[in-house]
Image: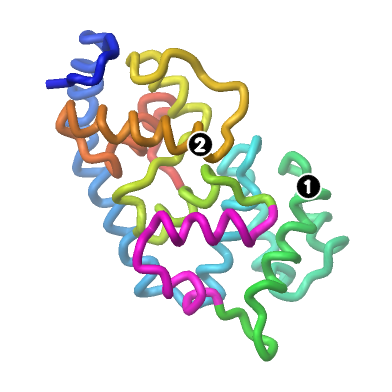
Amino acid sequence: MLHYGMTFDKHSVDQLRKIYLLKKKEIVARLREFEQYWTDKNDEEIFTELSFCILTPQSRAKFCWEAITALRDNDLLLKGNVDRIREKLHCVRFHNKKARYLVDARRLFIKDGRILIKPLIGKFADVHERREWLVKNIKGLGYKEASHFLRNLGFGKYIAILDRHILRNLKHLGVIEKIPQSMGRNKYLEIEKKMAEFAKGIGIPLSHLDPLLWYKETGEIFK
């Protein structure tokens, strides 16, 4: 039962549970893929995932992944300069800034000519500490994008990706009263906590609720 003082739309919650029953196996399978990513992938592949998340703000995920694939296939993601990278980002909003962000992120993890990202990220035992480090040290990566990146590495059990699709559904469900105009650290953590409490109250793990709401909004389970 839900006890924390907000009015929830019972019909919407019931509908969400029905969708969950239909999509649970697919969600579990996708999350297992994410859990294998950290173990199975090398540093360059982990950096590719980070680069994808840097591109995603205010851009469609599929377009961002297509841009990352083009950069990777043309050997630009790890070696290209800002101008060469920018040429491949025209389908991504704010491509000038994001080209610089990718180069800056690459410099952060380069050591002796190689990308070494797993040792830096892996030193944090707590996912929230790991997220704080990412937000503090990587330009263009906010809490949403850092959460997205960590979820895609299999560290999403206790964090949420609060994008516009998720926020819209949280408002519809009555978890939040309104969608905030801006999302600083305190507001992000406040809504994330409410979402976690809501997930616990309806018996759906937080890590499952995120892709479930994404599916409800978009009709697919993607990255």
Which residue is at the front of the view, 159 or 33? Answer: 159
Inspect the image, locate mark 2, and give the three-letter code of the amino acid beneath it: Asn
Q: Secondary structure at mark 2?
A: helix
Quadrant in which residue 185 is drawn: top right
Rate crowding at label 2 as few (under 14), some (14 to 19) or many (20 or more) other CA atoms within 10 Å: few
Q: CA distance from mark 1 to mark 2?
A: 28 Å
Q: Looking at the image, which residue sits at the far left?
A: 1
Residue identifier under label 2: 186
**Residue placed most toward the observer, 92 or 4:** 4
Instruction: Point out the stretch of residues depicted in magenta.
Output: 117-139
Residue 177 in picture, x, y percent from top left: 43, 13
Location of residue 74 by image quarter? bottom right
Quarter of the figure that contains the N terminus: top left
Using residue 195 as the reference point, say whether residue 25 is left or right of it. Answer: left
Percent across and percent down for residue 39 are 35, 74
Q: Position of residue 127 (x, y in %)?
A: 38, 58
